Amino acid sequence: MAQMIVNPVLTGFHPDPSFIRVGDDYYIATSTFEWFPGVEIHHSRDLVHWHSLSRVLTESVQVDLRGNGSSGSIWAPALSFDHGIYYLLFTDVKSRKSVYKDLHNYLITATDIMGPWSEPVRLNGSGFDPFLFHDSDGRKWLLNMRWDFRKNHSSFSGIIMQEYDSEAGQLTGPIHEIYKGTPIGVTEGPQLYKRDGYYYLLAAEGGTGVNHMVTLARSRCLTGPYETDPNYPIMTTAHDLTFPFQQAGHGSLVETQSGEWYMAHLCTRPIPGTATMNPLGRETAIQRCEWTEDGWLRLAHGGKLPALKTQAPDLPECPFPVLPDRDDFEATELGYPYQSLRVPFAESWVSLSERPGFLRLRGRESLASLFDQSLVGRPIQHFECSISTCLEFKPDNFLQMAGLVLYYDDSDYYYLRVTADEIRGTSLGVVLCKGGKYDEISSMQISVKDWARYYLRAEISGRELIFYASPDGEQWTAVCTPLDFGTLSDEYGGKLGFTGAYAGICAQDMDQQAKPAYFDYFEYKNITME
């Protein structure tokens, strides 16, 4: 019986897939935005089973994200391979909410997918979503959408292309505008392929919200003009806001060893009954595609809606080991699935060696900081899950906090934290931020001055989130009434962010005394009922 690809193949925050095949190996690179290390590479040999292979940008000398706004930083990596060399393009977005974007497009290379990667070379800054096309004549071309900040101009002013000189390590020659897009507009995410004498330009249109889609154009000449598929778009969910997947777009194509075609794309899974409450973020799915006799691409199952399941290619099954739910912090360094905000892990603020079997965090700046947070997190990947930790911490005052956080960005989070209160002594309770407005659930702040340890847990069930605390890990007390998990979503409050909800442990010391907090374990358990 043929295997089935069950979508999404990359659950939780894994957007903007760049999809390639090298021999029998398939790779997808995804965006990481302000989360560090940057650019995640996933690996498969059958398109059914996937695992995280590496994260590429691991040091600040490769890219400096300190001070970058939320949902800025690392956008839409483009992975390619040519004559034994892996090429990886990415954008560092410095000014996302401004009329200007201040875009830094970089290129790095490696002869092994695991690295080491070369030092980044900055190529241009005219737009985001860069893509490197390797033509059959050996020449290479950089494509990106062009951003136009001028009044009374379309911000998405077309797809442009310029030759890349690999020996000189720089762009050269004239800039060609090759595609203005369809009347739908917001044309971005260019991907270029060559097949049967045509150059095919795959693009994302309609914006990254509910109108997102994938369109295709083609030309006999590299520099155009490009003719749009008369039956565009290839795929979208814009016409059906009740479909289980939404925001389907940003496609990337790959051809299998036997000549079949598949498209990776991003999508969201909104909380049932909503179209935009998607706290798991933008995920990656895969669709089987077919070419028509007249040379246009279609979804193999027909129609324009993405398939929840699709037939996999006839390849040997290749599963990967399942990660354990619980991490007792017995390793020598933090690896997958953990990330930090904007800065790499450093012994100065996070340590697994200071106290073996514990992760030590030294308190630094607040959850509103865009610079130096002490937060270690991982994407939330399920609508039914339990997240827990055990904390040892002795705060001196209200400026010192540590605990368990569910975090979207500096404007939206829920935080079960231990701190010091001049009335209750050491106390525990939930603070939150919604749309940038800070609040405390004052009625349920409790004194825990006699507790030696603090067991903390978050339970997520659909749209409901409840925090619990315990002195011994056996007798648990709810420390809040049900909270709305849906507020940790891209479009909550109309903000249009691009990441997803993370679960993490963190510590703050806003008196700059670097008060340590010790975490005995971190557990993330999927409790979805199949």
Image (spheres, grey):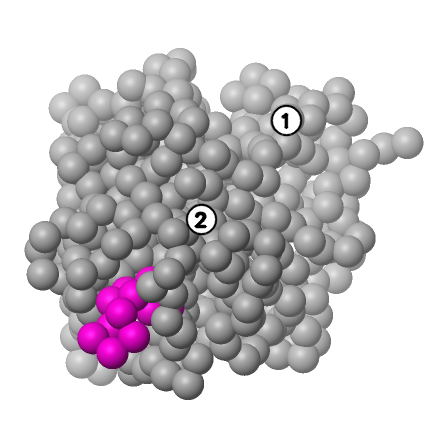
The residue sitting at 54% across, 29% down in the picture is 43
Q: Residues within 10 Å of mark 2 (few under 14, many from 20)?
A: many
Q: Please name the residue that numbered disc 2 is placed on.
A: 390
Q: How many marks?
A: 2
Q: What amino acid type should be assigned to the residue bearing mark 1?
A: Pro
Most extreme residue toward the bottom is 443
Q: Position of residue 166 (x, y in %)?
A: 23, 24
Residue 361 appears in which quarter of the rendering?
A: top left
Which of the two residues, 25 or 442, is positioned nearer the viewer here?
442
Residues in magenta, as a range: 417-428
In the image, is 335 to the left or to the right of 28?
left
The residue sitting at 18% across, 20% down in the picture is 167
Q: What amino acid type should be assigned to the residue bearing mark 2?
A: Cys
Q: Please name the residue that numbered disc 1 is placed on.
A: 321
Are the residues flagged by discs 2 and 1 in contact, CB closer than 8 Å? no
Q: Residues within 10 Å of mark 1 (few under 14, many from 20)?
A: few
One can see residue 389 in this view: yes
Which of the two residues, 156 or 488, is positioned nearer the viewer here?
488
Which of the two residues, 461 or 452, is positioned nearer the viewer here?
452
Q: Tell me the quadrant of the picture where the N terminus can be found.
A: top right
Residue 72 appears in which quarter of the rendering?
A: bottom left
- Circle 1: element type: loop
> Rounded to the nearest whole Å, what is the CA distance between mark 2 and mark 1?
26 Å
One can see residue 130 in this view: no
